[in-house]
Amino acid sequence: MSDDHVYMSLAEGHDDGDARWAFGTGFEDPLHGISTAVPDAVDRGELAATCLELADDALVTAQRLAEWTTRAPELEEEVALANIGLDFLGQARLLYARCGQVDGSQRGEDAYAYFRDADDFRSVRLAELPNGDFAFSMARLLVFAAWRLAHFEQLATHADPVLAAIAAKGVKEMTYHRQYAAEWVVRLGDGTDKSHRRMQAGLDQVTAHLGELFAAHDARTAVLAVLRQVTEAAGLTLPDVPPTPVGHGREGDHTAHLAPLLAELQSVARAHPEATW
Amino acid sequence: MVTTLTDARRARRIAEQVPDPELPMLTLADLGVLRDVTLAADGTVVAELTPTYSGCPAMAEMRAGVAARLAQAGYEHVEVRTVLDPPWSTDWITAEGRRKLAEHGIAPPGPAPRPSAGPVPLVLSTTRRAVPCPRCGATDTEETSRFGATSCKALWRCRACREPFEYVKEI
């Protein structure tokens, strides 16, 4: 190797021509080298379904967070939201890769992310709603991170060692995400009359979807404890949780917002289906 | 190829010296992401890397760097494996790594939070650990953003010398 720079070293060993270099590094499997075995005690179907649901939630959330780039109120918030989105994208990649090992299809992450339609996605509806007001986005991130964090804390002791490891790593990341969102909810709720009003409206919109989240994974106690703590500090009112879910994203029953989100996310991969990244 | 303990040590030393793509003043060993380097019976060097964050985009570059350096040193068969468990912690950044970070104007992390017995608590407090300014040493500093140019860093500024600085946040 003539150059010590690691980026230069990447350019070496790409025998398939410079044209493909733009598509990336040639490393495709985020679980490379990790045992693909599934313990006998684990139901493969259930494990695959869990990985797919959690991956779809993360991918759709990552895409919505990335949409704040160039649109956030301040540069620092844009960087923060992009970073949080990147963590979720990383979680999605690991979970899709595990799903492909377990569901018997041997599909790679791209097959799940880019070559399924909205009906096949198992993400919760809350994740796909448009970003709307910044206050709505912060309320959604708080609820989503608190709910997913509680779920991942449980999954960290799952009988499948790969899912358990992905979850244990995610717990650390989502502790930061939840903290970030909670501080914004307090700042806006406890801010001016206008910010308070908009924060309350965002919170009201998000809590309408709690029924769906709790039906998918009942982390009611943990999520409501966090919401009570944050709303109290913010001077906001925590609305009642509707007794029945507003929809069932887990069954592929989505709002009209998911298909356009996926169309944008999948456009490059579908235009160049043979490309590697 | 005759495999000896010396070969394994040499391979480890080479892998340890690969620079991190995003914090190039640190080696992968300084950062604590190189978990193990072993020599298999057939002479294959097996290097184990762990990502800092799930979405760390530098992972591919790290793997390429390790593979390229070992190949350059004459190891014909190299395998770089990912390990996820246990998850990376900033506690694994070595003393040498912390010294190099500070020397380059990046505040090193404090101790990582200990795992709690019950649910991870949410702390809504306005008082935070004072991070000393890596340039002038003053403790009159403030966070400007919890997230920075890479997943592992936050943005801070020093109110004494007025300089902004990066800070590797505990995880």
Image (spheres, coloured by chain):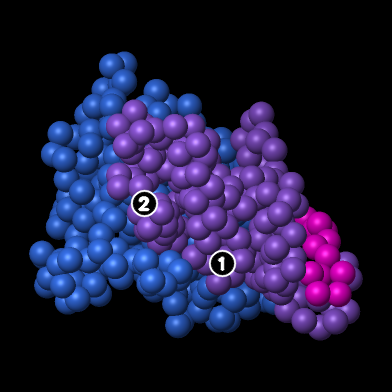
Chain colours: A blue, B purple
Of labels 2 and 1, the one closer to you: 2
**Can residue A54 be seen by looking at this rendering?**
no
What SS does tag 1 mark? loop
Chain to which mark 1 belongs:
B
What SS does tag 2 mark? loop
> From the viewer's perspective, is residue A103 above or below residue A187?
above
Q: Quadrant of the N terminus of chain A?
A: bottom left
Mark 2 and mark 1 lie on one chain; the one further toward the N terminus is 1
The residue indicated by pointer 1 is B24
Left or right, A88 with respect to A231, comes to left
Looking at the rendered structure, the kind of residue marked 2 is Gly
Frontmost residue, B55 versus B38: B38
Indicate the quadrant where residue B28 lies. Answer: bottom right
Left or right, A185 with respect to A143, comes to right
Residue A224 in magenta? no
Which residues are the magenta region? B122-137
Q: Residues within 10 Å of mark 1 (few under 14, many from 20)?
A: few
- Residue lying at 63% horizontally and 40% vertically, measured from the top left: B120
Looking at the rendered structure, the kind of residue marked 1 is Pro
For the view shown, which residue lies furthest in the top direction? A41
| Marks 2 and 1, how far apart at CA | 24 Å
> From the viewer's perspective, is residue A208 above or below residue A133?
above
**How many marks overall?**
2
- Residue lying at 17% horizontally and 66% vertically, measured from the top left: A15
Which numbered disc covers residue B74? Answer: 2
Chain to which mark 2 belongs:
B
